[in-house]
Image: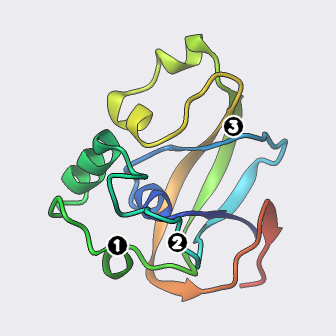
Amino acid sequence: MKVLTIWQPWAGALAAGIKENETRSWGTKYRGEIAIHSALKPIHHTWSDLYMNNDAREVICRRMNLPEVIDGPAVFPMGCILATAELVDCIRITQEYIVTLSSDELALGDYTLGRYAWKMANVRELPEPIPAKGRQGLWDWEN
């Protein structure tokens, strides 16, 4: 199965169905089943105001019924396969595309013009995260 490694808390938001798109600087022609993997290493400042903007924090906390102060690793496991989904499209971000997105979706991605939105559907969160070593790019996992 193809896998995409994503930093937390965005991997958890995708697995929970809070966001539909994962934004990337690169596109892919791959379509089909994909696993959502949370990166083992945290982004420096992921849980602070220095990295996650207030809009993203508000959306994640509201939609996951979490307090405004998040104990990141306890709420968002790292180094694990969290969910499976179908990668149904990879859309180059244009102004026309941006106006079709909800404010929540916009808060949870980098929709800079020219980047790509990897559109996920039929997300199925796993009952328990499965520890796995991640990789950069789109990679294969033997489950």
Image quarter where the N terminus lies is: bottom right
**102 displayed left or right of 140:** left
The residue wearing badge 2 is 42
Seen as rendered, the residue at the extreme top is 96
- Residue 84 at x, y = what percent? 58, 66
Instruction: Look at 64% across and 22% down and name the residue there.
Output: 113
The CA span between labels 1 and 3 is 30 Å
Q: Pick whichever of labels 2 and 3 is earlier in the sequence.
A: 2
Instruction: Look at 57% across and 11% down and name the residue there.
Output: 96
- What amino acid type is highlighted by mark number 3? Asp
Image quarter where the C terminus lies is: bottom right
Q: Quadrant of residue 66?
A: bottom left
Instruction: Look at 43% across and 62% down and name the residue there.
Output: 46
- Decide: few, some or many residues near mark 3? Use Cα within 10 Å; few <14, some 14-19, many ≥20: some
- Residue 57 at x, y = what percent? 29, 50
Seen as rendered, the residue at the extreme right is 29
Above or below 94: residue 127? below
The CA span between labels 2 and 1 is 9 Å
